[in-house]
Amino acid sequence: HHTFKAPVALASAYATNVEHVFGDLFPGMVGSALLHIFANSSVVNIWAWAAFGSVLTNINHSGYYFPWFPFRECTMMHDY
């Protein structure tokens, strides 16, 4: 997804097969599995985990600099 030269939120979904498995699916599954094992979470918590990950990824790739956002360095990293 870094082949896009302009920061576009929808470009965050563009990935190779390997990048999609290890960068998108695997972290989401590990995080939700840890929530289920250690916190005995329900499916709603897994949905919230997936929604947070999706929103965070889109904000990081949006190109907008939000001063209140704690991970704003990730947004600036995608500007080139």
Image (cartoon, rainbow, N blue to C red):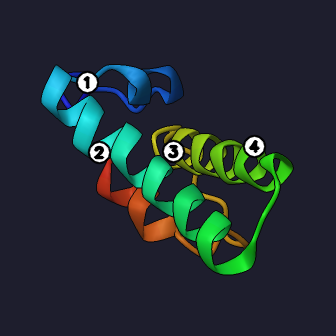
Residue at 27% x, 34% y: name it. Answer: 21
Residue at x 45%, y 40% (from the top left corner): 61
The reply to whether the C-beta atoms of the residues labelled 3 and 2 are less than 8 Å apart is: no
Callout 4–callout 2 Cβ contact below 8 Å: no
- The residue beneath circle 2 is 23
Residue to which mark 3 is pinned: 57
**Mark 1 → mark 4, Cα distance in angstroms:** 22 Å
Badge nearest the viewer, 1 or 4: 4
Tell me the CA gap for discs 4 and 3: 15 Å
Task: Measure the C-alpha gap from mark 3 to mark 2.
Answer: 11 Å
Q: Secondary structure at mark 4?
A: helix
Q: CA distance from mark 4 to mark 2?
A: 18 Å
User: Disc 4 marks which amino acid?
Assistant: Trp
Nearer the N terminus, badge 1 or badge 4? 1
Q: Earlier in the sequence, mark 3 or mark 2?
A: 2
Residue that mark 4 sits on: 47
